[in-house]
Amino acid sequence: MNFAKLERTWIVAEIGVNHEGNEQVAHELIEKAAATGADAVKFQTHIAEHYISTVQPERLAAVRGRALPLEAFRRLAQ
């Protein structure tokens, strides 16, 4: 998409990680954003192992639990 050619400003709803790793919640947040007139939504993705040390297993597990797999984002994009 070429945003320079848009005729109006797009409204992007920030979902971030508010789904807390639950794909159904992510879907519901997309639906709510659409119902309020948002043109798009934005998620934050992460791979916990890239920034959480394995010497902190509880923290690593907590951060992993809030992530969605890439396959979930492919489904949500539909």
Image (cartoon, rainbow, N blue to C red):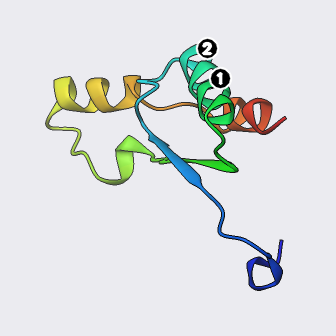
**Which residue is located at x 27 percent, y 24 percent?**
62
Q: Which quadrant, please, contains the C terminus?
A: top right
Q: Report which quarter residue 34 is drawn in.
A: top right
Residue in the picture at 36% in, 45% down = 49
Residue 15 percent across, percent down from the top left: 48, 39
Foreground residue among 44 and 31: 31
76 in relation to 21, above or below: below
Residue 47, quarter of the rendered image: top left
| Separation (CA) of disc 1 from disc 2 | 5 Å
Contact? badges 1 and 2 (CB < 8 Å): yes
Q: Residue at x 67, y 49 (%)?
A: 40
Residue 63 at what x, y percent from top left?
A: 31, 32
Nearer to the camera, 26 or 11: 11
Q: Nearer the viewer, residue 20 or 40?
A: 40
Determine crowd level at label 2: few under 14, some 14-19, many 20+ residues with C-alpha closer than 10 A.
Answer: few
Q: Work out whether 40 lies above or below 54.
A: below
Task: Give percent across and percent down for residue 2.
Answer: 81, 79
The residue wearing badge 1 is 27
In this view of the protein, which residue sits in the foreground, 73 or 18?
A: 18
What amino acid is at disc 2?
A: Gln
Q: Amino acid at mark 1?
A: His
Query: Where is residue 31, by image quadrant?
Result: top right
**Identity of the residue furthest to the left in this view:** 55
Mark 1 falls on what kind of element? helix
Give the residue pinned by disc 2. 24
Instruction: Return the mark for residue 37.
Output: none
